[in-house]
Amino acid sequence: MTFHVPKIDQYDPRIWNTAYVTGIEGVPWEGRTSVQGDMLVIDRPIDESGRLSLVWPTAEFGMCTLSTASLRCDDQPYLLPLELARGTLHRVRGRAADWQRVGLKVPESFLSSITIATDRFVDALIARETSIEDCEAFSLESIAASMQAQRPMCRAFISQSIQFRLQQEKQLSTLLAIQLDPRVDWLEDAVRSLPAMNTAIIAPTWHLVQADEKSVSLDVFDQQFRWASQEGLRVIAGPLVSLQPWAIQHWMSLLKDFDSICKAASAYVTSVVSRYRGQASIWNVATGLNVPNELGLSDEQHLKIAVDVIQAVRKADPRTPVIITIDMPWSEYLGQSGQAINPFPFADALIRAELGLSGIGLELNTNYWPGGSLPRDLIDVSDLIDHWSMLGVPLVALVNGSVYNSSDTGSTSKASEVHRWIVPSETPLNFNDASKGSTLHTNSPLAMNQIEIIQMLLAKQNVHAIGWTQIADREPHRFPNGGLIDRDGKARPVLEGLTQIRKRYGQ
């Protein structure tokens, strides 16, 4: 599949590395991306029709993942801006039609913007035969209008869905959680964040606690469990095991064989669950078993580890609900590696095995690439939850995304240099809450985006818990600028947004 990109030199070249093609089920195919002159070329081992997705600069959401409609393989190149305009317009109009069929009342601002988007797309189609420059300009205007249209549409969906939920329950039963920091001086940040949560996430993860084969220290987590109990907070405990690339300890590769890894993981899980049994409301037993890592394990071996640690929890604590968490649930990584695991059938297999799995966690580390998920708009978040809800079990959304402030420019994290390119420029704006009409003042577009993502998750009845997984940026993190408190100890606007959400809807 070949795409003509006019003025290709004006774009950040790193966006082409985010491109991938999905089939009718939305699963990325492995492919190789290259730039040849002003052409973006996607090579795949199959010639089936597919939809191209990649990060693209937008006025409404900054850098955001956009998609074309389904395209067949063709010797003639497609014009990329035109096809992104077609795909974006189709996606927004289609979702509006779906939601209207179930009773959504769309606002006038949506109708006016979508009319402009449609008109500009028609102009682009007409100009395609006479002027590539005009076609590109009209296509970009159509994309901008489509993205502008989706925000009031999604806000209306959020508002009406939450109001429907509130008719059934006086307060939303969704758990609102923040993950406590494993640092020794964690308490100050936890107390500052307390108004925003009714649940604490305490994560004595294997690679943090067991730095080598013998040493184990859980003192900090003992203190956190006691504090949560004193404050009347529920606790999501975990993930207990992570096989994400950054969580692989050097000693794991020294274990004699795969069975030794399974036994060591199960033994650690058993010790932690036995220690804190009765203090956790949910056990998050593992995360990242679906993503590639340095251990070189097969799909069957990843599944075997998952089964073993779930059974270890069930044996040590038969009553407390257990979840397993999927990293990068949009599975963009499948476009980079054919050896990676498709997460949806992986989770489905664990549920069908009847191991006592109570739900699925989804790590939504948006605005980070590589290692996290590409930046996503509200329709993408809604579609993701609807897709995973097909499994028929409760979902736990574990959210983290860059909420970069102007004060973060001096960050020393090497990773921030890698990821900052997807962060839009700082512009003051107001976030008008869809459900109450009040205004939340922010100084970061990403802070607004993340609050809206939280509200979209609240609108989804199958999401039983929402957790923010990075409380502070005092120490370097693999996801920089994602803390509710920045590296200078200043609370970011998103913390106030979460506090307001809990006051309105939380227990």
Image: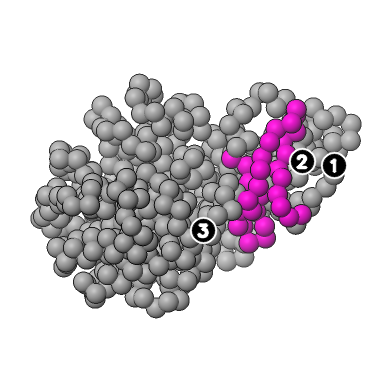
Q: Is residue 37 shown left or right of residue 311? A: right
Residue occupied by mark 2: 2
From the top left corner, tell me how far across and down residue 446 is, in percent. 44, 36
Tag 1's secondary structure? loop
Q: Which residues are magenta?
A: 18-47
Calculate the distance from the C-alpha at mark 2 to the C-alpha at mark 1.
Answer: 7 Å
Mark 2 touches mark 3? (CB < 8 Å): no
- Residue placed furthest toward the right: 130
From the top left corner, tell me how far across and down residue 157 is, in percent. 51, 56
Crowd class of label 3 (few under 14; some 14 to 19; many from 20; radius 10 Å) = many
Residue occupied by mark 3: 341
Q: Residue at x 41, y 57 (%)?
A: 289
Amino acid type assigned to the residue bearing label 1 in the image: Gln
Query: Can residue 334 be found in the magenta stretch?
Result: no
Residue 76, numbered label:
1
From the top left corner, tell me how far across and down residue 495 is, in percent. 30, 40
From the top left corner, tell me how far across and down residue 84 is, in percent. 69, 42
Classify residue 122 by image quadrant.
top right
Mark 2 touches mark 1? (CB < 8 Å): yes
